Image: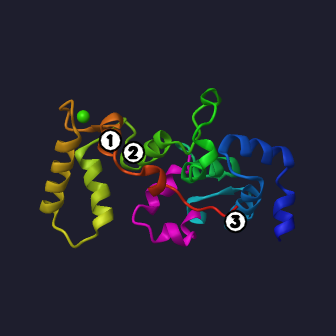
Amino acid sequence: MGSRASSLLREEDIEEIKKQTGFSHSQITRLYSRFHSLDKGENGALSREDFQRIPELAINPLGDRIINAFFPEGEDQVNFRGFMRTLAHFRPVEDNEKNKDPTSGEPLNSRTNKLFFAFQLYDLDRDDKISRDELLQVLRMMVGVNISDEQLGSIADRTIQEADTNGDMCISFSEFTKVLEKVDVEQKMSIRFLH
Ligand SMILES: [Ca+2]
Ligand SMILES: [Ca+2]
């Protein structure tokens, strides 16, 4: 099983994914076997149902939103490269990356990219703003049923009031960034991948 999976991944593909995502060679081959075992259709791509079999996502209140983030707009399949690009946002920032050559481009796991990933979980219509309604939807998913609509509404209003500096009653990405200025996003949005 394992050898069959890794034989489908060519050495040059691994090198390219390594460059693009910062994952190590062994992480890529390990994630490839995971990808392969989730790929029930055995067509080299994952569907939404394939993702729903990942227990960590099945129990996450934002699981569906996170699953959505793996799919390019309008598509219902994601290949291994796309899978790895999305996962790369959750790669912890290693010490040796902190003073990297700035000309090599912004890595997918940078603070800004992690924040933008989180922002997009809210911005369902992708108009680059979080509206009150979009915020409410996420709040409702996170808090469950033990809180009234009225209470949720006032949490949403307060959050927007605090974040909204240009007075359009929506939260832009820069307003979002400002609110989370003091939050350790790098640490909160990281998953430990085995080396
Ligand atoms: Ca929006
Ligand atoms: Ca605003």
Residue ID for mark 1:
176
If you read the primary sequence from the N terminus, does the residue marked by circle 2 or circle 3 appear first?
3
Label 1 SS: helix
Label number found at residue 81: none
Quadrant where the N terminus is found in the figure: bottom right
Q: For residue 153: magenta?
A: no
What separation in Å lies between label 3 and label 1 (alpha carbons)? 34 Å
What separation in Å lies between label 2 and label 3 (alpha carbons)? 27 Å
Q: What is the quadrant of residue 105 in the picture?
A: top right
What separation in Å lies between label 1 and label 2 (alpha carbons)? 7 Å
Give the prevailing secondary structure in the magenta stretch. helix
Type of amino acid at the residue the image marks with label 1: Phe
Q: How is the image coloured?
A: rainbow
Residue ID for mark 2:
119
Label 2 SS: helix
In the rendered structure, the answer to whether residue 4 lies left or right of residue 123 reads right
In the rendered structure, the answer to whether residue 190 lies left or right of residue 38 reads left
Q: Which stretch did the figure color magenta?
A: 51-71
Q: In this view of the protein, can residue 38 be seen by the observer?
A: yes
Q: Residue at x 73, y 55 (%)?
A: 28
Residue ID for mark 3:
34
The residue at the far top in this view is 103
Instruction: Using a 10 Å C-alpha cutoff, classify the residue at mark 1 as few (fewer than 14 neighbours), some (14 to 19) or many (20 or more).
Output: many
Q: Residue at x 34, y 43 (%)?
A: 181
If you read the primary sequence from the N terminus, does the residue marked by circle 3 or circle 1 appear first?
3
Q: Residue at x 76, y 41 (%)?
A: 16
Q: Position of residue 91 (x, y in %)?
A: 58, 53
